[in-house]
Amino acid sequence: MPLYALLKSKGPTGFSYGSTAADVTAGASLAGKTILVTGCNSGLGLETMRVLATRGAHVVGAARTKEKADAAAAIVGGKATGVACELSDPASVRGCVAAVRAMGAPLDAIIANAGIMALPKLNQAFGYELQFFTNHIGHFILVTGLLDRLADKGRVVMLSSAAHMMAPKGGIQFDNLSGEHGYKGWTAYGQSKIANLLFAKELARRFAGTEKTANAVHPGVINTNLGRYLGIPAPIAALGYGIANALFLKTIPQGAATQCYVAANPGAAAISGQYWADSNIKVPRYDAEDPALAARLWEVSERIVAGLE
């Protein structure tokens, strides 16, 4: 389908590629709700924070430093609170968990928005490839540390990506989580994004029998700070969009739509364990649906986290 048609073609939810975060939350009252958003200081995180605050939510925005988070909260206005959360630093993540817990209010949603992308050279944290550690392990520590603070109908939204299709064969290279036995920036990024997706799937299984939900989303291809290591917008062809569509990057308000829909729209309240794009359910790569792989990743993640303490 040509992109110009895709922009107007609405899915079952009534929204589409061209819908914005404001569109998908129109009419929603989030008064009395508390929502945590990571990566709040720019791009999708800042827009998500702004729109949810506009709808009445108390938005807790996490950024690498308290100063950046507080600055974002000031820009957003409304009821917004900044907290520090450097995802590659377990001590910082645990500090964020403690700060959020100290606020006392249950969390109606956690939006794991922050991340790094396609590092050109191998970087590590605590002996693990940095994208896997930051995008997955950092959020694993954060979300699992706050699960008992999640409201009875709370929602967890993990930002994955269409780039999960670029993950290595088998999804996760458990024998090369350090990256030392071969490293390619996009493959490593893809691995971190399928890890986000698998984490959401396993969390959804663990939520079975409750009204809590967990889902993964692909925001679309947007020229944000996520691509700062590339010097140019993310390679559209590599993400499966084709050179012809390179001129049609989503805007930031469009890119923030899917995570806002899944976190706040009543239409997503009872849906769990899905992969979303353009504010509609999509089909991920086949091994992202593998419950054994998701369970193994959870167990390995727990061992990694335990080893950091």
Image: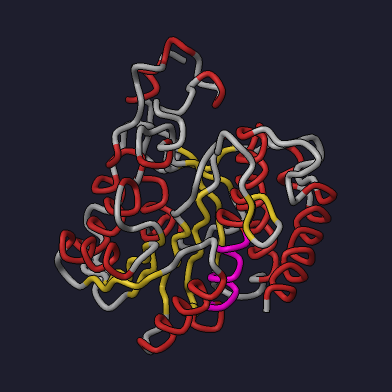
144 within the magenta span? yes
Choose between 85 and 48: the one closer to the eye: 85
Task: Give the left or right position of residue 298, taking residue 214 as reference.
Answer: right
For the stretch drawn in magenta, the main secondary structure is: helix
* Identity of the residue furthest to the top in this view: 244
Q: How is the image coloured?
A: secondary structure
| Residue at the spot 76% in from the left edge and 58% down from the top edge | 297
| Residue at the spot 29% in from the left edge and 71% down from the top edge | 82
* In the image, residue 215 above or below residue 241: below
Q: Quadrant of residue 61?
A: bottom left
Choose between 299 and 210: the one closer to the eye: 299
Q: Quadrant of residue 110?
A: bottom left
* In the image, residue 78 above or below residue 266: below
| Residue at the spot 42% in from the left edge and 55% down from the top edge | 267
Residue 185: x and y in percent read 62, 34
Residue 54: x and y in percent read 18, 61
Residue 149: x and y in percent read 49, 82
Task: State whether residue 273 appears in this view.
Answer: yes
Quadrant location, the C terminus: bottom right
The residues colored magenta run: 137-146
Task: State whether residue 197 appears in this view.
Answer: no
274 within the magenta span? no
Choose between 187 and 92: the one closer to the eye: 92
Task: Give the left or right position of residue 160, taking residue 177 as reference.
Answer: left
| Residue at the spot 78% in from the left edge and 61% down from the top edge | 295
* In the image, residue 149 above or below residue 275: below
